[in-house]
Image (cartoon, helix red, strand yellow):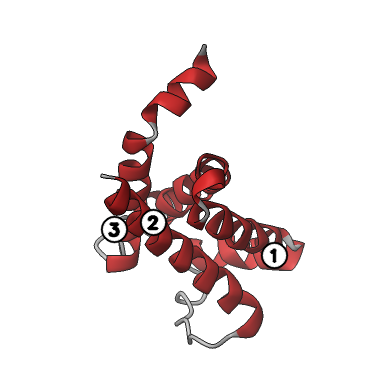
Amino acid sequence: MKLASNIAAGLLGLVFIVFGLNFFLKFIPIPPSPQGSPPAVFIGAMYLSGYLTFVKILEILGGILIAIPKTRTIGLLVLGPVIVNILAVKVFLAKGAGLADPVIILITVLPLFLLWTRRAKFISLLD
């Protein structure tokens, strides 16, 4: 189980580091949302306000923290709200479009698996 947890954490960390760095370095072309669509307006507002830069820095930081076993729990706490917001944009603004993308499935399933393997640490937060 520890090997599977390490692989899942490494893969999840890699995804967030790559896509976080892509915002700054632009090495993977991302197709824009249709002009005037709710997702395009939302992302545009986040971009213009500088909030998207903050989120991308959190993605990079969370990806690094998740990849390191000693800081994995903190990494999950950092990336949790980011993942929820990504899913909320896909569900509410994009009307479910893109939910079946492999990356979206990956960033949904892997954290749930990691939460399950570290459930004792998260339950202790509630006590």
Q: Which residue is labeled 1 in the image?
A: 53
Q: Position of residue 89 (x, y in %)?
A: 45, 54
Q: Residue furthest right?
A: 49
Query: Eyeballing the image, is 53 above or below 76?
Result: below
Judged left or right of residue 122, residue 119 is left
Q: Position of residue 21 (x, y in %)?
A: 60, 74
Whichever of callouts 1 and 2 sits on the residue coming sooner in the sequence is 1
* On-image quarter of the N terminus: top left
Q: Residue furthest top?
A: 127
Q: Secondary structure at mark 1?
A: helix
Q: Which residue is labeled 2 in the image?
A: 90
Q: Secondary structure at mark 3?
A: helix
CA neighbours of label 1 inside 10 A, class few (<14), some (14 to 19), many (20+): some
- Nearest-to-viewer mark from 1 and 2: 1
Which residue is located at x 60 percent, y 63 percent? 60
CA neighbours of label 3 inside 10 A, class few (<14), some (14 to 19), many (20+): few
Name the residue type under label 3: Ile
Whichever of callouts 1 and 3 sits on the residue coming sooner in the sequence is 1
**What is the C-alpha distance between the residues marked 3 and 2?**
12 Å
Query: Eyeballing the image, is 112 above or below 7?
Result: above
- Nearest-to-viewer mark from 3 and 2: 3
Which residue is located at x 51 percent, y 16 percent? 126
Q: Which residue is labeled 3 in the image?
A: 105
